[in-house]
Image (cartoon, grey):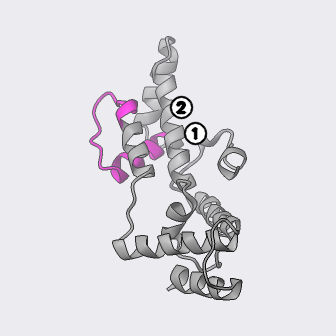
């Protein structure tokens, strides 16, 4: 439900994805995921994507941005395409800054004509890429099992206080 109802950010393709303000949204997203799963406040953010099975909002916003640019690029109106080319090549615009930063972040070479579909594929691949170390993956799997037990989805031989203590230790250490 969070992914459906909590991510409709109208106008987001026009936001600055690398400015200070976006960090507040990322923090709010992290807090929301922790709250949704009943995790301690100090849970490491690197665990959240894996525990929630929802990609972080930063990837969703970037992929929407690239899809938006791709739709403009496919426009039959040459004026739209000309404005798009000016925006993506001018780093003084938010769009230009965003595309430049995305190209740097995903190590994509800038060509004279940007291929938004291939950029989109890089962003989507990163969205679903797991970057956790094996020991962190093990911790996430145990935390998921404990959450399932706390929610009554599965059974384990511990009481709620013991499960919460283990989740706290695994998620914050």
The residue identified by callout 1 is 13
- The image quarter containing residue 100 is top left
Q: In terms of secondary structure, where does tag 2 sit? A: helix
Q: Secondary structure at mark 1?
A: helix
Does residue 83 appear anywhere in the picture? no
In the image, which disc is placed on residue 68? 2
Q: Judge whether residue 27 can be spotted in this image.
A: yes
Residue located at (55% from left, 46% from top): 61
Against 51, residue 3 (above or below) is above
The question of residue 151 being in magenta is answered with no
Separation of disc 2 and disc 1 at Cα? 7 Å
92 vs 8, nearest the viewer: 8
Q: Residue at x 41, y 47 (%)?
A: 102
Disc 2 vs disc 1: Cβ atoms closer than 8 Å? yes
**Quadrant assignment, res 22:** bottom right
Relative to 34, is 104 on the left or the right? left
Query: Of 9 and 22, which appears nearest the observer?
Result: 9
Magenta range is 95-118
Disc 1 crowd rating (10 Å Cα; few below 14, some 14-19, many 20+) is many
Labels 2 and 1: the sequence-earlier one = 1
**Residue 94 x, y percent position in the rendering:** 53, 43
């Amino acid at each position: 439900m969070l992914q459906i109802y909590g991510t409709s950010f109208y106008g987001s393709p026009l936001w600055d994805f690398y400015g200070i303000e976006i960090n507040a949204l990322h923090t709010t997203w992290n807090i929301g995921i922790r709250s949704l799963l009943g995790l301690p406040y100090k849970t490491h953010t690197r665990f959240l994507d894996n525990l929630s099975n929802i990609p972080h909002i930063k990837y969703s916003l970037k992929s929407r941005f690239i899809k938006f640019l791709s739709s403009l690029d496919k426009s039959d109106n040459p004026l739209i395409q000309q404005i798009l080319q000016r925006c993506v090549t001018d780093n003084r615009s938010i769009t230009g800054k965003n595309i430049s930063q995305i190209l740097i972040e995903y190590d994509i070479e800038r060509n004279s004509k940007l291929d938004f579909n291939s950029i989109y594929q890089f962003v989507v691949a990163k969205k679903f890429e797991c970057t956790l170390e094996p020991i962190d993956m093990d911790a996430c799997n145990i935390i998921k099992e404990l959450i399932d037990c706390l929610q009554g989805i599965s059974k384990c031989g511990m009481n709620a206080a013991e499960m919460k203590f283990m989740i706290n230790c695994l998620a914050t250490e």
